[in-house]
């Protein structure tokens, strides 16, 4: 293949300073949460107070990123009830997701965090468990210093509209589809 | 909007165990490298030996993720010469990228790492600075315990073919396009 030209001119410089931004990682591919955790790691290294709230994963499933994040000083809250298909009581699962949002809202409104990650929040939003318009209002009217990252498939249009940066992680292929099991250390 | 149905049935279980996989994060959107760093954080928390090699970023640009990664025990090598449009000597910039690959190859072939991240390697591949077929051969014939993540736009088709999991980070929108400057702690 013919090599591409080496770029010798950079992009135009951005000039506007934003006190904080809202990012959304959505799509059916890998890396939505993982990229958010990578950013959390970057933010905490800069001395920020960082909080990650997991809306689906439950506390009983200890994962590698949680261990690493906590050792860096990231506040890490797994308030979800686990996969819905494992739920023995869907009302309880829904109540736990609602509670996760009351905690998320509190963290955002406290103004104490440089970054709040709302991991997999799109699922309870899309299931009608937590109000999309309330989430969007809280994010829109947040203390100006608080950056937000929201992750999950099928991000609601109102959330996408509000966000400054939106990335769709699109699955080109995934080992799982060939029957390959998740690898501890890579996938969780 | 009408809520979506809550899933009550999980996906079919995967049954094949793979000793290691190859992941590629490509596309024009945010999160290719950040997701790789998030995975590196997860892997090191599992006790793996992890190495990140940056093919474009230079060592003079200290970033948050490097600080966090090193504190976790990740081996972090920025061997790039920086953005090509800042290069004062393109032959030297090319030589540095080639050297980064000799280091990357050595790390992979040593078999000592659970994960080797080849960050932004697609750029020197696409510019004809390092041989795509050599990179693909080394990855294909690697020690079976070594997982690989390669990142960068326009991943060469041979690399995509070889990979187990490929994600395209697609830009839906980006604050930068509205002239918003990168935020220290979020973007670097």
Image (cartoon, coloured by chain):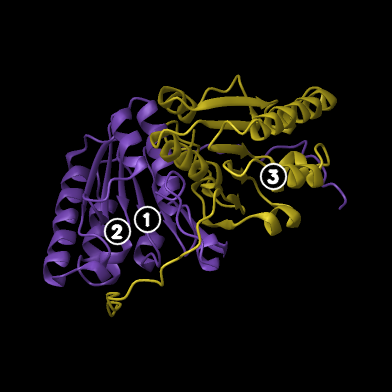
Chain colours: A purple, B yellow
Asked whether disc 1 touches disc 2, contact meaning CB atoms under 8 Å apart, the reply is yes
Quadrant assignment, res B142: top right
Numbered disc 2: what chain? A
Residue under disc 2 on the same chain as residue under disc 3:
no
Q: Mark 2 or mark 1, which is nearer the start of the sequence?
A: 2
Residue at position x 16%, y 70% in the image: A88
Instruction: Look at mark 2 in the image and give the residue it sits on.
Output: A121
Instruction: Look at mark 3 in the image and give the residue it sits on.
Output: B139
Which label sits in the foreground, 3 or 1? Answer: 3
Q: Residue furthest right?
A: A2
Numbered disc 3: what chain? B
Whether residue B150 appears in this view of the structure is yes
Position of residue B172 relative to residue B9, above or below, is above
Instruction: Look at mark 1 in the image and give the residue it sits on.
Output: A151
- Under circle 1, the secondary element is strand
Q: CA distance from mark 3 to mark 1?
A: 31 Å
Which label sits in the foreground, 2 or 3? Answer: 3
């Amino acid at each position: 293949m013919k090599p591409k030209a080496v770029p010798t001119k950079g992009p135009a410089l951005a000039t506007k300073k934003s006190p904080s931004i809202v990012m959304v990682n959505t799509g059916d591919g890998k890396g939505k949460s993982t990229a958010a955790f990578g950013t959390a790691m970057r933010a905490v290294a800069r001395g920020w107070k960082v909080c990650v709230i997991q809306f689906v994963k439950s506390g009983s499933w200890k994962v590698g990123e949680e261990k690493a994040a906590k050792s860096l000083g990231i506040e890490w809250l797994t308030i979800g009830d686990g996969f819905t298909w494992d739920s023995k009581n869907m009302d309880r699962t829904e109540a736990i997701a609602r509670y996760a949002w009351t905690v998320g809202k509190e963290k955002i409104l406290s103004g104490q965090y440089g970054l709040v990650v709302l991991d997999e929040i799109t699922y309870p939003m899309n299931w009608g468990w937590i109000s999309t318009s309330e989430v969007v209002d809280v994010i829109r009217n947040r203390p100006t210093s608080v950056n937000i990252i929201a992750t999950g498939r099928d991000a609601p249009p109102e959330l996408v509209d509000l966000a400054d940066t939106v990335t769709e992680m699109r699955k080109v292929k995934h080992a799982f589809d060939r029957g390959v099991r998740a690898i501890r250390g890579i996938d969780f």
